[in-house]
Structure formats: C-alpha cells, structure tokens
Image (spheres, rainbow, N blue to C red):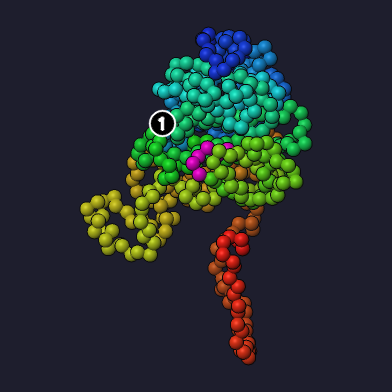
Amino acid sequence: MTASNRRGFLTGMGAIAGAVSAASVSKVAMAALPEPVIQTTPDTASPLAPPTGRPYNPVVTLNGWTAPWRMNNGVKEFHLVAEPVVREMTPGFKAHLWGYNGQSPGPTIEVVEGDRVRVFVTNKLPEHTSIHWHGQRLPNGMDGVGGLTQKTIQPGKTFVYEFVARRPGTFMYHPHGDEMVQMAMGMMGFWVTHPKEKHPLIDEVDRDFVFLLNAYDIEPGSYTPKIMTMTDFNIWTFNSRVFPGIASMNVRRGDKVRIRVGNLSMTNHPMHLHGHEFVVSGTDGGPTPKGSRWPEVSADIAVGQMRQLEFLADEEGDWAFHCHKSHHTMGAMGHEVPTMIGVDHRGVAKKIAGLVPDYMVMGERGMADMGEMEMPIPDNTQKMMAGEGPFGGLEMGGMFTTVKVRREQKRGDYADPGWFKHPEGTVAYEFTGQVPEPTRQAAPAASTPTAAPTKDVEVRVRRPASGHSGH
C-alpha cells in the first residue's frame, strides 16, 4: 500500500480538508478527513481483522482488498477516492479504467450490523459522480442518485454519506451519475455487513470470498474500454481480472466455504463449481430461508444481483469455478470471424503466407490450436485462450479460476499450495489395449400392425356462439 500505513490510518486524524455533505449529516462529519489508503497492486490481500469495534470473521476479496477505517466518536469512517486507475487484468495486459483508491473494483467495505458508518467520497474524475449503496436500507438522501436524492459530486469536491448499517448481508456500491460511462469504466465495489450476533439464517464459515463480475470491450492493442458497447463485450472478468490473472481460492479440506458473487456486467452469468454441491444461502435482499435452499452446481446470477454460495470443501483437488457461458471463458475475441471448421484451405494459406509471412490458418479443426499458436498479437492484448496447468494448456480465459482444496492447508492460510498431487491411480489415462465391442440391444421382433377401424368415425365440432362469451 502507498500513502500512510494502516496503523497511521486507523489512529491518525489524516489530512485536513473541507467536506461537503451529501445530505444533512452531523457536525462531526465535517471534521478532518481520514487519509485515503491507496492500493496499486492486483494481488489478493490477506483478510483485515477488525482492530476496533465488534469482532467478525473478515472476508477475502479476490484480487482485491478491504478498506481500513478509523473510529471517530463511535462512528466507522472510510474514505473513497474516485479516480482514473491502471488495472493489470493479467500479466502483460493492462487497462486504463476508473475506480476507487487506486484500483478497479474499489476496496471492499466491511462493517457490522448496527454500526454507524460515515464514508467520505472525494472526486478526482474529470466529471461529476455519486455513489449508490446497492441494496442498503438507509435515509433517502443518502441513496446516492445524482439529481434525485443529492447534488452530484463535482470534480475536486468531497461529499459525506452517513447511515446505520441496518441489516446484515452482501451489497455493492457503484455510481449513479453518468452511470453508463462510469460503470463501463470499472467503477464499482463490494460491501459486506456482518451480523452483530449469531443469526439463525447466517452460518459461520471458515473461508469467505467476495468478488464482482464485470465486462469490458477493449480492442486488441488498446487500453481504454469502449463505453458505448451494449452487447459485444470481449473481456469477461472477476474483479477486473481475467484468467490466468485471477487468483485461486485456497481452502483447507473440511472448511465451510462461502463465495459472495455480485454481477455488475450487462448480462447474466451461470456460475458453475466442479466437484462439490453448494446452496444459495443469500441474495442482496438478505439471507434465504433454509427451507428454500437446495443443492446446486450452477447458479445463474442476473444483472445487478448478488448470490452467496456455500459448500463444504470435502473433496481434495484443484476444482474449476467459472461462468458456464463458454465465450465468457475466452478473451480478445472477434465476433465476426467466420467458422472455417472442415474447410481445407491449406493451399490458399500457403499462397497468402508468401505475401504475408505471419499469416496463420484459424479454425480449420476447431479453436483448440489457438492456445498453442505463437502468432504475433498486438501489445497489451489478452490471449484468447491462456493459462498453463500441470498437464498442459488450460485453454481458458476470462471468468475462470480454481478452488484449491488441501488437507494440509492450515486454518487461516490463504497461500497458493501449488498444483494438486493426485494419488496414484486417480488420473484419467490413455488406453492402449483392444477396445471391446459394445453390447448392443437385440433388434425388436416384428410387431403386429394395429387393425384398421371397421367404420369411419365422425368428429363433430361445436362452434361457440358469437361474441366472447365462450372464451
């Protein structure tokens, strides 16, 4: 982290600056601003245990971090800075986005049910903005809709949002000013409110992960998203990261695991977990009744929704977790490339290669060859299918990662344990013997045709009376 260290942030008064309130707030809110803590690396930070206030089991933000706070007369104070950022989406591929505190998404805000929360929001964008606290119960003037519930935050200004975290659950924050542009540029973040005491519908878990689904249209070789795109996105991300840049979720065998997923992209995403079954234990509306839960391996998350997935990690291995829309686990795709499967164009390709040395045949036998091609691509371009596993190319990109379950993983240890060492005899292998003939069903005996009716059958149709009385 840059700026001050966390201890200085939590105990110091920070920089002195004026604050303009988003609505009517207490005079205490006009006191000295807490200094913002900035994060510039895309690594997954360790969970931030609460140094003050009510205790809770903190979350881990995939390829992100939790915002520190300071206590000020019993109020938890945070400081978000809306600003242009550079986000490394995967090694070798960076995007020029807008975000908060040096990253897109911004830091996760963690509080406890009943906390009074004060958030200072400084605008360093070239245009006005606001923040909507998605899913929260709060005073109308704190809801963050520019022009409706507040004046917009102009460049260089700081507003204050203050309210009580009234109910536990998983929420999000994002702009409600020039929303199409600002969300397309990556402005969003996660908010988690922990229960203040044992809750009948919220189980205690050993590992609690959070991340947002978002998408971008970034042309190969460029850095800035095309903000006018409605459907043809080509970069599909977890927390603005694409595989193989997405961190794995590392857990101990036997852990109860919760994965909180929010969707702020422009389409739905069926999230699929291998090797385990989960239940949907919560939405952005709150925890689900236990009688409404059933085992799933895929859950569809619509636009603007959040889902909490919970499961017992009782099967060791490196288990895939990904969006089940196949195009969403690829990247830098062209949407107008013709399908050439089954077309033998080797002769034409040879002639073209004489004129264009770097020309390569694409798609004659499917797209798997693309994962191994060394065809030059523009600088700062995500490969279509990337990532290496212990058995070769994974042929995945975009919305894909793994849940790594290990018996030797220590409690509270989130370090990557490396690839799974499979017990002998538990890996699929090539068979080189004689394949036996399959057992086939015997042909059915000739059946006796049904006898024809002895006389014609007349069907009488009764027409309804005029009008609509018979409908």
Q: Which of 23 and 71 is in front in this view?
A: 23
Q: Nearer the viewer, residue 392 or 25?
A: 25
Q: Which of 68 and 336 is in front in this view?
A: 336
Q: Position of residue 191 (x, y in %)?
A: 61, 29
Residue, x 70% and y 49% (percent of image)? 294
Residue, x 29% and y 52% (percent of image)? 359
Quarter location, residue 380: top left
Asked whether residue 106 appears in the rendered view, the answer is no
User: In the rendered image, which quarter contains the C terminus?
Assistant: bottom right
In the figure, 159 relative to 401: above or below? above
Q: Where is residue 306 in the image (x, y as percent from the top left)?
A: 60, 39
Query: Which residue is disc 1 drawn over?
Result: 96
Quarter location, residue 438: bottom right
Disc 1 is placed on an element classified as strand
Q: Give the range drawn in magenta.
A: 261-267
Q: Where is residue 322 in the image (x, y as percent from the top left)?
A: 55, 46
Q: Where is residue 261 in the image (x, y as percent from the top left)?
A: 59, 39
Name of the residue lying farthest toward the front: 466
Residue, x 65% and y 36% (percent of image)? 285
Q: In this view, does 282 lie to the left or right of 130?
A: right
**Residue 241 located within the stretch drawn in magenta:** no
